[in-house]
Image (cartoon, helix red, strand yellow):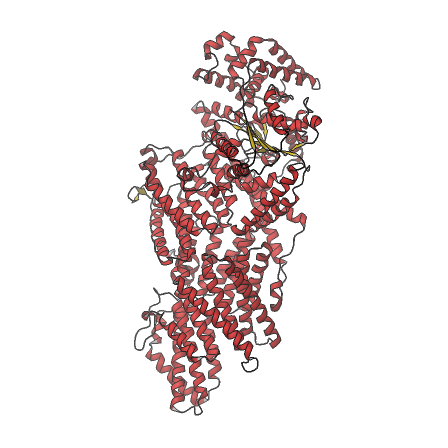
Amino acid sequence: MREEALLAATNQPRELVSRSEEMHQIRQAIYQTSSDCHIVLIAGPGGLGKTRMIEEALRRLGHESMRQLYGRPADDWQHQFGKKAIACNLLDFSDIRLHSRDFFLETIGSSLTWNGVVEFSRHEMARARQRRLMDAGAAYSLVEKATEAAEIDFRRDYHKAAGMYRLVIPLDTTEQLSIISSGWLLERQLLEPKEIAFSTQQWLVDQIEYGRFPNSTLLIAGREEEGEHYFAMLSEAVEKASKPTRLTVLNLEPFGEAETRSFFVTLRDDWQKRPQNNLAQDVADTLDVLIDDEEQLRLLHLYTGGQPIRLSLYTDILIEGRTIPEPLQDSLLQAYDRVGSGVETDEMLTARQEIEGEFVRLLFSQPGLRSQILQALVRATRGLKAEQLHFVLDSKPDDKPEAWQPDQLRLAEIEAELAAMQSMSLIKQKSGGRTGLQDEVYRIYAEHMNSTEDNRRAEMVARQQLYLRLRDWADSNRQRVQAQRTAYIRHDLGRIRQERPSTILNTHMPKPTAEEELRRNQLLSDLQDLDLEYLHYNLLLNPDTHFNDTYYSLANKQNRALNVASGAVVQSEVWRLLQDKFAFAFVELEPRSAISNRGESPAMVLHRAAQQDDAATWILRFWMTKQYQRAVHFADAVDTAVSHLTNEHERHSWQHTFARSQRHCWRELARIYLGEGIPDAVSRLQIIVSELTQLAQADIHTEVFPGENGFVGHPAYPRLIFTIANCYTVLGNGLTILGDYRDAVAAYGAALKYLRQLPPTDQQASTLNNLAQTLVEMGKKRAIRVCNEGLQLRLGSGELLPIAGSYNTLGQIMNELHRSRESLQASATAFAIAAEIGDSRTTGLSMMHIAEGLRRLVREDQTLSNTDVDEIYRTAEHAVGQAQEIFMASNARHEAIRVIEINIETGCLYRDWLARTAETAVPDIWQQRLGRATYFLNSAVKGAQQLGLIRFELDALVNLAWTHYFAHDWDGLAKTLAAADTLFPPDVRLRPDEQPPDTQDKPHFFFQHLSKLHSLNGRIAFDNYFAEDDPASRAAQHHLAHAAEAYVLSLGYAQLFSPRSVGITAVYDALYDYLKQLDATQLTNFYRYEQQQRTRYRLDALKGQLENLGDLQDFLLDCFGDYYSEI
């Protein structure tokens, strides 16, 4: 036969064969008189036509695409009942994205899914906002609120539509909802079902139980055995439903002998109705002969078991096969002797494999395009588009996807062939316009190719070649889409108009057009789909490597973006492949002696690694959703459950230093955010990184801890490196909060050292951001270049909220460096992004930095008029007040540190404003600003004391002391100075006739605040000196000597803090203003006192321990981590 006839008999019969009783029950469930919800569960083994039944129901309901495929039905329900009932497009859970509640709702709540018959306008608007937030990388809490709002609008639109029509929702391949990544945790009741509500599996069950599908019929098809767990959940939900809900279960059985004959009659009739040509005539004649041959029909029924998909394939073998397999040449008696009476025996399996071997030979023996397409489709279970097929079929091995130029004529030929194949019974449409095959065809092909080792290895090589090309295709396209997203982000940021200081809160992002927004949302959807495709083929190429590399990288990408739902979809893709025994039959998992020695297989170990990853991910999810106490309790509960495991190997694996440390890293992060026990969390993290680094330094043959070898040469080595980097970053967070900047910089440097062994990630950008914040706390201007590197990485990822985070950090850095105008520019950009997204937390942070920038601008720019100053202060007051409301409204313990920070800034604002206010001219306003300054600074002191955070307490006390100074409140000043003095350890002080303190093991903030306090003492001493009538008097000289001592100490402490600190400049500026008022005699006296105090405190000894500003080693350690240890 000609190539165009390849597998011709596998065309679906246009009329559904048999199943009349089942279709009658479906019609009753749809056109029932009540408006109750009715669920029809179509269950049975693979290949029995479950999908075809749903398609037939859609066809009879008037679904246009099904009528184009199969023609107008004889039993036309739409004609009989009108448009009383309407159906949406078929939703197939082989699309892993539909396992996410968000994507499922987005799909089912789209007017396009319902072919425009009903509108979901409110839901689509709400969903567009949610997509914008996800596109921007908004915080989980914000996305979740938008998701909840979208779901509420979905229900409103759905209920409105259900008031007009009976709504029919067809769901296929639902057995895949039984694949649960968190099964280990759920079995041990460590998770509650409500906590996995982001999955379609749980959401669908909940909606049925809550009675939220009014006037609806759900057609749910799935394999009975694989879907047993989920089908039981559905049945239980129906029983518990709060509103009347019915369940009809249709258990499909294979065709009987009579139905087998009907199948061929229907197929023959279809071919007779086609335009007559040689192909149609040949097939029709062959089917006529078959129909009249009762023994041949019974033989086919015996070997196929009445399974429709096998009937099609075996018939095609009879029509097109070059040889007829021996079992199909048997007489009926011979067949019974060969396999018995039809029971699924080993003999039956052997006979089927022999028959199906001819199907495989048929696939590969025929020349031409259809054969090439089918060979690719049978190996690519995700389905393929025409463009992919063109690339894998027609490109040369060294052709790169990014440089590939398609031949439009050839592409059109492939598209036409795919269109012609749509009616074949073995074809199944996949998501995203992909064409695939029926699951049973994949199984048949895989079983045959796995029947001998030679076949398996040949197939493995062929698959590896195909998957490599498809992986490269996905990677090239994801990079292209990502570049487009980055381009529009940069374009938008470049269009932000800078406002003048007094109107800076008017800064806003440009608004894209509705058309542009749709295009951007599509880019995000495309990128997520390409990420999944890239992961899919990488896992098929090498699951050991890419579980620990590609999967971990993509999962972390979603986690850093606080995207719980998308992270769960990535995880689901892994779990689906782990349970696909046919795909794994052609994957070579790396054998390791440690695994075989304990009687396990690599697949078992990989499965357990996925379970352990799931447990660690849940701790991170609780942190992402700000359930910090739940994260800690959950981590502890997992540890307890692990200790009770009876299988020694399983228990040891869960308690392995690596697995345990992954969980405990996120546990300690949650504790740090709780603000409780931070020193203890830091100590635990130091132990964790110490143990993990030992594992990273030894190879797989070297024992590091009892029963635990090193990871060099292990597939999980990249994941270990990433975990170490995460732990160091979390450690840096804790150290920074405690004010131990030097150790924090070392921790961040260590994190970057490990991250640079891996491709750039969002984690690297976050670590750079944190490092920059800490460097500027030490007065180091290199924080700017470090922050900018992180910003560029985030711009490359194209998510707006993390970009806003980098701009906020840049604003903070510029404020610390007294570069207020640059700070305002960066902070205003962050504000514009946050306002566009609607993220209150980022808005609050940016407004706090804007308020500080405005406050500092007044101090730095002496050209501002009084009117400008007043407007700027009022804008700062508004900004800091809004920030105060945002963080106070959160009423969450994790924001306690932010509340302290903003209380300090609010107090500083009113203090500076107070200093520019004439007490005698406007006493009421002056007193009001004084009261507010002291109130907010005292509140910050109390908040810091409650959390035991000395750094913040000192910061608030120092600023309170300056407030009392400006208010001339000497009693308040004395009390504040005394309170601050008690917080400084003795070994951080400069003492007469003693060596200066060693700064290596002491938190830097002590020196920073000692410098500020002594600078204040110097001001007081100079003020007292100038208040004396006689500058030569003993009292005056006492004040001048005290001023010299104060400034010597202030600058000494400033240098101990950081020789590059802008605080040194501020001290010099103040000192210069005083010294320029002295005459020659007074200057001589000051020089004398300064020299005496310098000698007394041995400040010359500082030179030996101070940072060398030109020291390259210091620069390298700060920015890149410690590689000297590798030398």
- Quadrant assignment for the N terminus: top right
Quick check: can you spot residue 553?
yes
Expressed as whole percent of the image width and height from the top left, the position of residue 391 reads 59, 35
Asked if residue 152 is positioned above or below residue 246 in the image, the reply reads below
Say which quarter of the image contains residue 405.
top right
User: Quick one: 78 or 596, which is closer to the camera?
Assistant: 78
Asked if residue 916 is positioned above or below residue 711 in the image, the reply reads below
Asked if residue 912 lies left or right of residue 1045, the reply is right
Asked if residue 505 lies left or right of residue 333, the reply is right
Q: Residue at x 32, y 34 (%)?
A: 598
- Quadrant assignment for the C terminus: bottom left
Say which quarter of the image contains residue 675.
bottom left
Asked if residue 147 is positioned above or below residue 645 in the image, the reply reads below
Expressed as whole percent of the image width and height from the top left, the position of residue 622 reads 45, 48
Asked if residue 433 is positioned above or below residue 874 in the image, the reply reads above
Q: How many marks?
A: 0
Expressed as whole percent of the image width and height from the top left, the position of residue 1059 reads 42, 70
